[in-house]
Amino acid sequence: MAQGLDVGTMNLLSARQDGDETVFVQQRNSFVEIEYSDMAEQMLSRSDVLHIRKDNQVYIVGDDALNFANIFNEETRRPMQAGILSSDEQSAIPMIKLITEQVVGDPKYNDELLYFSVPADPIDDDTSTLYHQKTIESLLADMGYQPEPINEGMAVIYSELANREFTGLGISFGAGMTNVCLSYYAVPVMKFSIARGGDWIDEQAAKATGTPVDKVTSVKEEDFSLDFETDVGGVEGALSIYYDNLLDYVIENLIKEVDEEDVEEGLDVPVVVTGGTSSPDGFEALFEERLNEANIPFSISDVRQAENPLYSVAQGALVAARSEEQRSAQAQVTEDAAEEEAQTD
């Protein structure tokens, strides 16, 4: 069976079909470093806490990293930054390898097909995503998979717009980047990313309020909503301000890119938003309001949020992988039948 993988700055998520159900596995894409001791090693080894030891340090990896960071008053570290592998983090590759192994597991058979998400190159930054893509591809191949990259925005289309013939605008609001893809009958007409996402919101809110970034992230993920009823001055007020600013920035760049790509003005398309950054209550309504106020060169039929924003990209990668798996199987059947007919003749 094929598998899909969302390689996100904040989370890694895999999707695999099990009968009629889709099974998701998730790990936070972060780690924290604590000093080694025999007692700490014994306690961690007896627990389910994902960790590795290197010299005199112990690395707590995945979902437990944020809890340990808050307990020890430390900042979590990330293998990825701004949507790609971090060039500033020496432990980036071994850490993301460990987390990826936990999320996807061993392949069910050699060269099992696995589609993994990759961001488009950002239009507001000179960052290249090629090294990131090839490194993840190599890690997955070493694990025994047959890896195939899929654009993150296109994965949203595959996940959410099957009932619209894979036509529409898919926007993934991730932690490191915001990815945008306009598709027409499953053919990407325009795809790009913006080098701002949930991390940018957290960092700006942290600076504005003098609050540690991890604390801001925790507030955002617990029960934050975009209702603009919170008094300005606190963390939630700052989060609302920078969410509003991010949406304006995304729409501004969307209009600019549509103009440059000369997208047909007669299009009437749905918009679907997804990604962990789009999770707060009120996000969908606020984004629709901003889109309606903007002078977008084509018509938007409706705006909606994915049913499960966190899982949408992994789901889309799985849809693409299973489609390719079925196409390859059918091609093999056709080839075998042709060979059999040739031998008969």
Image (cartoon, helix red, strand yellow):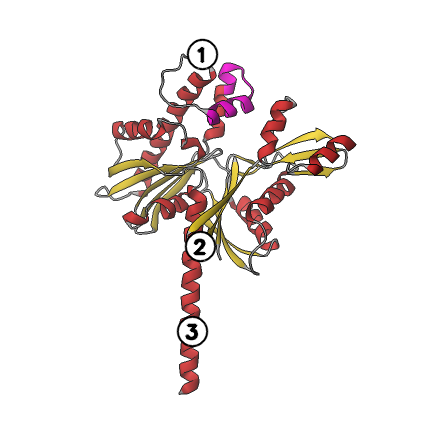
**Can you give x and y, in whole percent of width and height, for residue 258 in the image?**
31, 39
Separation of marks 3 and 1 at Cα, in angstroms: 67 Å
Q: Which residue is mark 1?
A: 233
The quadrant where residue 331 appears: bottom left
Q: Write the residue at 31% across / 28% down.
A: 285
- Mark 3 or mark 2, earlier in chain: 2
Q: Which residue is mark 2?
A: 19
Relative to 108, say whether 225 is above or below. Answer: above
User: Regarding mark 1 in the picture, which secondary structure is present there?
Assistant: loop
User: Regarding mark 3 in the picture, which secondary structure is present there?
Assistant: helix
Q: Write the residue at 49% across / 24% down.
A: 202
Amino acid type assigned to the residue bearing label 2 in the image: Gly
Relative to 108, say whether 26 is above or below. Answer: above
Amino acid type assigned to the residue bearing label 3 in the image: Glu
**Can you give x and y, in whole percent of width and height, for residue 71 in the image?**
63, 23
The mark lying in front, picked from 1 and 2, is: 2
Q: Which circle marks residue 335 in the picture?
A: 3
Is 327 colored magenta in this rendering?
A: no
